[in-house]
Structure formats: C-alpha cells, structure tokens
Image (cartoon, coloured by chain):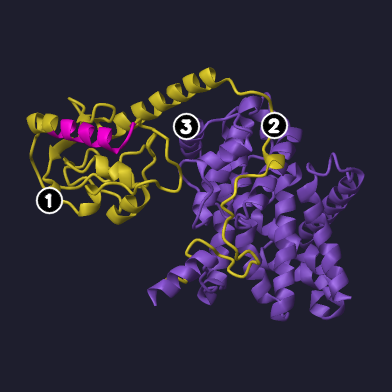
Chain colours: A purple, B yellow
Amino acid sequence: MEDQLLCCEVDSIRRAYQDVNLLNDRVLHTMLKAEENYLPSPNYFKCVQREIVPKMRKILATWMLEVCEEQKCEEEVFPLAMNYLDRFLSVEATRKTRLQLLGATCMFLASKMKETVPLTAEKLCIYTDNSVQPGELLQMELLVLNKLKWDLASVTPHDFIEHFLSKLKICPSTKQILRKHAQTFVALCATDVNFIASPPSMVAAGSVVAAVQGLYLKSQDVSLSSQNLTNFLSQVIRSDPDCLRSCQEQIESLLESSLRQAQQHGGPAESKRVDEEVDLSCTPTDVRDINI
Amino acid sequence: MSDVRLSNGSPTLERTDPRLPEHPKPSACKSLFGPVDHEELKKDFNAHLRELEEAAAARWDFDFANDQPLANGRLQWELVEHSSVPDFYSRPPRENGVCSGNNNVDHNGNHHCDGMAQSEETSRADSQMECTEQSSGPRKRSACHDPSAQSKRSHTSPEEVSCPNLSHSAEHTPRKTRRLSALQCVQ
C-alpha cells in the first residue's frame, strides 16, 4: 500500500480537487478588496528607476517566462514573480546589471509560494549563465522580502479566472480549453508594461473575454456574446464595461503584435528568443482549428 | 492525504508531469544585462543586512549578531530549559532542503557555515544567558524577531508581551525559532 503511494507521488504531481466552497462571492469580494494592496506603482520607470527602462522589463520577462516554461512551473508562478518584480521596482532603484538577479529571485520566491517542488537557487543561477551565485540570490531574496514587507500573498489574475469560469454556463471540456487560453493571455499580459497597473481582476476578466472571442464560443450561446459577457464580468469585478472592453482590446492587440513579432523573427537564429511568444500566440489558432 | 496539493488553486492544469531532473537547456541560459560587479553587490548587501539587523535589534532589544539581549532594553529576556519548549525548537533542520546546499545565509540573512557552527553558537549564547538572566513576571515565548513580524507588540504594557502565533512562525521560519530556543522574552 505504501509502496504504491510512493510510486504515485513520484510519477505525477498530486493535486487537491478544487474546493467549491472557495468559489463563492464572499471570497471573490475579499479578493477584489485585497488586490488593491498588491498593485505596483504604475510609473516606477519615471519616478523611481534611473537605469531601468520598459524595454529591459520586457527582455527580463521574456527570459523569466522561458525559464518557467522550461522548468514546467505552475502557471501562477510567472505572473506572481512579475508582481514581486514590479512591486520591488516600485520602491527600490535598481542597477541594470542586477535586474536579472532580481528576476531570478522573484521566480525563486514565487516558486516557493506556489509549488511543492520549488526551483532551486542553483538552477536559477545556471539560467543566468552563472552571472550570479546562489549566495547572492539568497541575499537578494532577503532584500526583496524586506522591501515587499514579507507580504507575498499577492492576488493574481489566476485567482480570479476560476471564479469567472464557475459563473459561465459551459461544458467542462470547453472550460478546460478556455482556462488554458485565459492563463496564456494572463502570462502574455505579465510580460507587457502596459498592464503593470491593471488590477488582476481586470486582466483576468479581459483574458477570459478575449479567450471566449478567440475560440468563437459566442456562436454557441448568446450569453457568451462579447457584449453580454463583457457586461456580465464587469459587474462581477465591479468595474465599468468600457474599461473591461478596452482591456480586452489591449490584450488582443498585444497578442497580434506578439504574433507578428514571432513571424518576423521566424528565422532559426532568432527563434530561441521568441520561442515562448510563438507558443503563446499560436495556442488560440490551434484550438480554433480543433473547434472547427 | 498524499493527494493534497495545498499550494495550488488551479488543479486542472495540464501540467501533471513532475519537474524534469535534467539541467537547464543551454539556450535559456543567458546573461541579460552584462556582468555583475560581485564585490560591489556584496558591499551593498552587507549594508542592507546591517540596516535590517539594526532595525531588528531596536525592535527586540536583542543583539542577534551575538545572540544576547541588549543591556538597557525595554524587554527582558530569560533563559528556559530546552525540555520545556516543543521539540521543533531544538531538533536539527532538515538536511539538504530543496532550496540549496551551499548557502550560508539563513532566513534572517545571518551567516552560518553549517548546522554545527550554529549549534555551537547557540550553546555559547546559552551560557552567556545564564549570567544575564533576569526573571520576573509570567513567561512568554518570543517566537519571532524579524522586523516585519505580523503583530505589533506593546512594549510599554505591564502585561505579557504578546507573541505571534507560535505554530505559524515555527512552520515558516524553523531556523529562526530554533535559534532562540533557549530564550524567552518577559516583560
């Protein structure tokens, strides 16, 4: 009996079933209130940083996503790490040469928060091409923790997606695809500076609407039409439908530009750099094919 | 209970295969923004650590570097027997935790070469503590000394010093609480 159990644990990640008791409006409202506390400052590039510019964040985010993908991290790890990164950069002027150390540290922390087998300091250092050492990463960890006031329980868009999906009348298999797409959009948003100050609930709602659009689910059910869904979800997150619509459009245009970029850099020499963007961008197309 | 995955809120992701044991692919290993000045980084970290230690010392009236209470503090620290505290304060840390083998910085940023050195330090502190022991009032554990501990204490209150949830601290910062195993803070 025990042997069997051990074997199972080795073979795959064990997960608890979703606790439906946590998918109620009380929890949702608490999260909507809590998310405000974890928003980075929207203009830290201007107000706090001297060396760091938006383009560097993009480069760093692309690398972090690549590492998370390759290490098969839980989907939440990357957006959570980006939240830590933005919150840190909102309060602490940072050298350009230490930005990657910071990014690695944020992944280290996010992985510890969300995974049963977290990323190790050594592995993350290898990913920096050994430009930083494990000891430095651990000291950076302490610094980040202090600057974040040890509050790592950030609300992320992932926390909201499940709530939104539970409110939609769709079959489980569609839900699964929708979830996957919405999560992909969330990751995409986390790489983009324009979403730094967007509340996670807004990013999540915009991602769900964009995913429904992308999958042509609207033709199946009138409640999933763009307008109905936008109106419904904007009520859920207590926001304005126009805000949500503009967020959704922003996500769609971000997807488009990522796709374009991926095609332009399609050459073998450049393919590494845009690998994950190709992944991100291609998913909706693939699934659309399946649906048709 | 082995089925429980506490940390994950989205259980139906496709990723169910375990993390690969292999090393990172070379393609993803890159230095993004040029070489790091390790010496300068070390200097800056040390400055930060000093700041943190000073803040912690002021908050807890305790010299964490030398493991002894500050002389004229508002808090009084007293020595207690190992046997009178739960064993998680005194048992050794897990060997080779997931987050790395060769670091010498614990959760507080304090430097320790290894477990042996740490326990020596603790026992040294214990013997020092016996000299400075001041006993008065009811005993209360001090579970936590980082500057951002969740509960604010009222240092001026004549009552017991309130402490953060014991099991909570123990779970999250086992090393920290272990180091203070022999000391209790009394008002």
| Front position in the image: A290 or A80 | A290
User: Would you name the residue on which mark 3 appears?
Assistant: A135
The amino acid type found where label 1 is placed reads: Ser
Return the x and y of residue A65 as percentages of the image width and height: 68, 47
Mark closest to the chain's N terminus, 2 or 1: 2
Instruction: Pinpoint the chain carrying mark 3.
Output: A
Dot 3: element: helix
Which three-letter amino acid code belongs to the residue tagged 2?
Answer: Leu
Q: Residue at x 86, y 69 (%)?
A: A288
Q: What is the three-letter code of the residue carrying label 3? A: Gly
Query: Is residue A87 among what the camera can see?
Result: no
Q: Chain of mark 2?
A: B
Which residues lie in the magenta part?
Answer: B112-126
Magenta stretch encompasses residue B32: no
Residue tagged by mark 2? B32
Asked if badges 2 and 1 are on one and the same chain, I answer yes
Q: Is residue A137 left or right of residue B71?
A: right
